[in-house]
Amino acid sequence: MVRELPDEVLVYDLDRHKVHCLNRTAALIWRQCDGRTTVAELARLLEKELGGRVDEAVVWVALESLGRAHLLRDRVRPPAGVA
């Protein structure tokens, strides 16, 4: 279950009975996680939406966090050397 609020998105995990509050950046990334969109494409999307440069490391941090919260089908790990 998803509820859109002005500055965040609330996601209720029905399986684990947990609520997750996603900030704008995490919500933008989460909405685009389709298994086909690359990290570089996600970074460009964020740049367009947020109006500034976004490093791919920001996307990786968000993806790791979303994975730990079980909000992605599969957990992802950044390649070696990406902080």
Image (cartoon, rainbow, N blue to C red):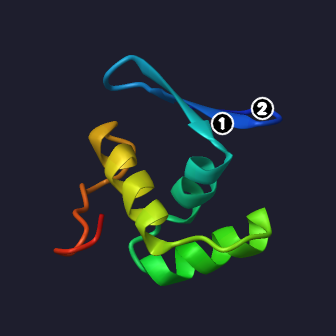
Looking at the image, residue 1 sits to the left or right of residue 4; the answer is left
Q: Position of residue 29 (x, y in %)?
A: 55, 59
Task: Kindly state the secondary structure of the residue where label 2 is placed.
Answer: loop
| Furthest-top residue in this view | 17
State the mark number for residue 65: none
Name the one closer to the observer, 65 or 55: 55
Residue under pointer 1: 9
The residue at 66%/74% (across/down) is 53
Q: Amino acid at mark 1?
A: Val
Q: Nearer the viewer, residue 32 or 25?
A: 25
Question: Left or right: where does residue 29 sit relative to residue 59?
Answer: right
Is 19 situated left or right of 82 in this image? right
The quadrant in which the C terminus is found is bottom left
- Residue 75: percent from left, percent from top: 24, 55
Residue 56 drawn above or below residue 63: below
Q: Which mark is residue 5?
A: 2
Disc 1 to disc 2: CB gap under 8 Å: yes
Looking at the rendered image, the quarter that the N terminus falls into is: top right
Please name the amino acid that badge 2 sits on: Leu
